[in-house]
Image (tube, coloured by chain):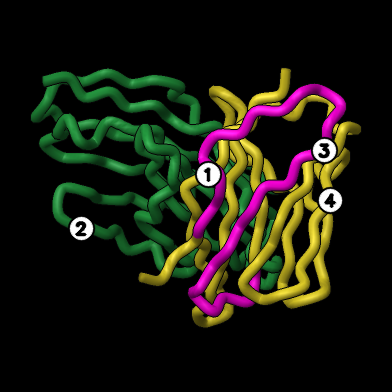
Amino acid sequence: AQKVTQAQTEISVVEKEDVTLDCVYETRDTTYYLFWYKQPPSGELVFLIRRNSFDEQNEISGRYSWNFQKSTSSFNFTITASQVVDSAVYFCALSEEGNTGKLIFGQGTTLQVKP
Amino acid sequence: DGGITQSPKYLFRKEGQNVTLSCEQNLNHDAMYWYRQDPGQGLRLIYYSQIVNDFQKGDIAEGYSVSREKKESFPLTVTSAQKNPTAFYLCASSIVLDRIYEQYFGPGTRLTVT
């Protein structure tokens, strides 16, 4: 069965600190897709990244970076030099190929960045 | 502007009443989804639709109903049979890129039933 675990319920950091949000997934499929979404206080989910199971290259986008490791079934998200605007709930999600696009979400990690 | 619209943002109902949540998209996406979010929890799939006039139950469909008469619209009805209807409801639509469904979300409707 598919499952996504975000063990960190809440994280609090001071502005400019680096922070890593953990995501561990379970799936029997060899082809799958992993996502990260950001949910600011307004409630709307904002797409951040998608990663295919056959592409283990790490990705960097500005202050954001993602570390995908199939050996440990993890897809961790790091924010470098955090800012107050990064405060939000972050969700990791999993989708299997051809599975009609259904997403399995983790429980989310609430990140609070204090000035 | 292209996007997904959900209205209203806040909705209040008395217990025992059915209520319909609106979801409209002008992105020309084929697939649409409804999720429910409870405090401190992730999103759970209620219903989804890949084409017009067709839809499937998700993980927590009991007490909900949907219709998909138009490509742009996927309304969700929360019936009186839903035992705990108070929640945040998110609608999404997706585009298929290289057989991958990439979902985009609306702003959500917060439903309170008393």
Mark nearest the camera among 2 and 4 is 4
Residue A87: quarter of image: top left
Q: Using the rendered image, report if marks 2 and 3 lie on a common chain.
A: no
Q: Say which chain tag 2 marks.
A: A
Residue A97 in percent (x, y) is at 64, 69
- Residue range corresponding to the magenta coloring: B5-31
Residue B12 part of the magenta segment: yes
Q: Is residue A28 left or right of residue B24?
A: right
Q: Is residue A77 above or below residue A60?
A: above
Compute the Cα span from label 2 to label 4: 40 Å
Neighbours of disc 4 within 10 Å: few (<14), some (14-19), many (20+): some
Q: Is residue A82 visible?
A: yes
Mark number displayed over residue B18:
3
Residue ID for mark 1: B108
Mark number displayed over residue B65:
4
Tell me the shade of chain A: green
